[in-house]
């Protein structure tokens, strides 16, 4: 039997046994930021001073300032398109830094998409930075504000598997009123595409069926 015929027979046998042949798994998108929408702290007032913000840390006195959307002159529609929700003001009592550190998996692709939404009461700006333990300073620039509406900030970054990433936001050092508010923080990476288990079984089926006639022929030639 010719090689092409062997492959057809093997593929048919693999399908009959439930093997999927040459399929491969799609790269899975992974969200690395914890509590990027700042929703995991309960309060019903216009704003709250709190130390309880899951996933995040801050310099200085360790306190955060969280707001409810639509309160104290903030945009009535939140950055997620809803009329309610919570977000972070980057400057509470002084020029502090709000940050989060997470570890990337080893089995990831080398690109990442980092994004966040920003708004300011008086159009002021702050700073955002992203630092990798292996790749160094990935981002360090001013936060974009479009008037007093929520503005999407999006960056494509190159990362290294297994490194620690720190995302940090810093308000305006002069005035908390001019410091940006942050919401919808996201850091997405994709895992590397790997063959599905069924694909490997399919390949084994091809190998087994292709090798069987050759082995049989060799046995016949032996005295």
Image (cartoon, rainbow, N blue to C red):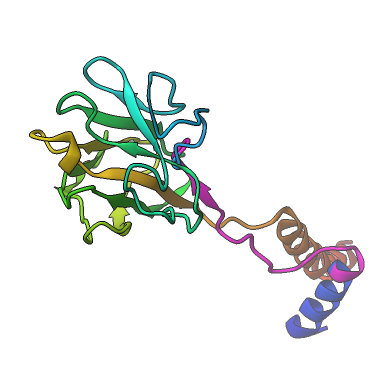
121 above or below 156?
A: above
Q: In x, y percent, where is residue 123?
A: 17, 52
- Image quarter hosting the N terminus: bottom right
Residue at 15% x, 28% y is: 95
Q: In x, y percent, where is residue 90?
A: 26, 35
Give the image quarter of residue 7: bottom right
In depth, the one of 208 and 212 nearer the eye is: 208
Q: Please check the rendered image and state whether residue 36 is part of the magenta-colored stretch, yes or no.
A: no
| Span shown in magenta | 15-35
Q: Is 150 displayed left or right of 96 in the figure?
A: right
Q: Please check the rendered image and state whether residue 17 is part of the magenta-colored stretch, yes or no.
A: yes
- Number of labels in the image equals 0
51 above or below 165?
A: above
Residue at 47% x, 35% y is: 34
4 above or below 99?
A: below
Q: In x, y percent, where is residue 80?
A: 47, 55
> Taken as a whole, is the magenta stretch helix, strand or loop?
loop
Q: Is 119 displayed left or right of 185 in the figure?
A: left
Q: In x, y percent, where is residue 129?
A: 21, 42
């Amino acid at each position: 039997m010719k090689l092409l015929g062997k492959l057809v027979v093997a593929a048919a046998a693999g399908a009959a046994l439930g093997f999927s042949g040459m399929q491969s798994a799609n790269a899975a998108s992974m969200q690395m930021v914890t509590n990027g929408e700042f929703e995991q702290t309960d309060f019903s007032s216009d704003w709250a001073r709190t130390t309880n913000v899951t996933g995040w840390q801050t310099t200085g006195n360790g306190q955060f300032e969280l707001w409810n959307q639509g309160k104290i002159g903030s945009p009535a529609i939140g950055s997620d398109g809803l009329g309610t929700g919570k977000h972070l003001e980057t400057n509470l009592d002084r020029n502090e830094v709000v940050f989060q550190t997470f570890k990337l998996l080893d089995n990831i692709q080398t690109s990442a998409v980092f994004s966040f939404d920003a708004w300011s009461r008086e159009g002021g700006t702050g700073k955002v930075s992203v630092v990798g333990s292996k790749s160094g300073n990935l981002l360090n620039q001013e936060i974009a504000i479009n008037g007093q509406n929520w503005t999407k900030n999006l960056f494509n970054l190159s990362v290294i598997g297994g490194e620690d990433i720190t995302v940090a936001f810093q308000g305006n050092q002069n005035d908390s009123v001019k410091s940006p508010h942050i919401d919808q923080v996201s850091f997405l990476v994709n895992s590397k595409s790997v063959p599905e288990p069924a694909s490997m079984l399919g390949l084994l089926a091809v190998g087994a069926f292709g090798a069987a006639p050759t082995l049989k022929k060799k046995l016949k030639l032996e005295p």
